[in-house]
Image: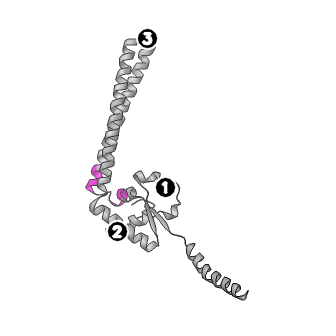
Amino acid sequence: MKRILLALGVCVSVALPLQAQTQQVTKVGICDFTKVLSTAYKDTKALRDFDQAKSDIYKEIAARSKEIADFQNQKLDADKANNKAQSLALEKAIADKQNDLDSYRRVKNAWLAQQSNALLTGPVLKEIYDQMTLVAESGGYALVLRSDGAYRDIILYRIQEIDITDDVIAAIFAKQGKTYNPATGQ
């Protein structure tokens, strides 16, 4: 009986430290690459050109949408006036314009996504990864997830305390000899 109790005591004393080790909490962080890029690299020509192209595309989409809305109003007027020929012509024009707008939007959004991904390559991507690694290591993070673009749908819930984006931006600014204020984004 003493042997059984002794063996049980040894097993418990060995198992307790192992159990404590398995309950260690892993620190996880999140970094929004889009925010890092748009904040830390906003003064670069490539990002300014991208923003201008995006603005031009959105203006064109708005202009085309307004044209469709104008045609829809004309169709309503033709319907009120019982002008079936004009109403049918306008209905066809609206459908054609809507198809054109949908195609334009699809092509331009794909192009914008491609250009956005191109901005995050080469030296820029390496610098972001380097600074993110430094922030993660100094903060004791075991895992950092990317939370921008297509990756947003993967993260269902998060708390603000795990977001290291502002820390990464501050590290990049410090490397560039600037200071970063998260409250103002500059």
Q: Which element type, helix, strand or loop, lies under badge 2?
A: helix
Can you see residue 173? no
Under mark 3, the amino acid is: Asn
**Contact, CB < 8 Å: mark 2 with mark 1?**
no
Counting from the top left corner in percent of width and height, residue 116 is at 32, 51
Dot 3 or dot 2, earlier in sequence: 3
Q: Residue at x 30, y 61 (%)?
A: 124
Query: Looking at the rendered structure, which numbered label has been put on residue 155?
Result: 1
**Residue at mark 3 to residue at mark 1: CA–CA distance:** 54 Å
Counting from the top left corner in percent of width and height, residue 74 is at 39, 20
Mark 2 sits on what residue? Answer: 130
**Residue at mark 3 to residue at mark 2: CA–CA distance:** 68 Å
Marks 3, 2: nearer the viewer: 2
Q: Residue at x 44, y 64 (%)?
A: 144
Under mark 1, the amino acid is: Ile
Q: Nearer the viewer, residue 13 or 178?
A: 13
Mark 3 sits on what residue? Answer: 82
> How many neighbours does mark 1 have within 10 angstroms: few (below 14), some (14-19), or many (20 or more)?
few
The magenta segment is: 37-49
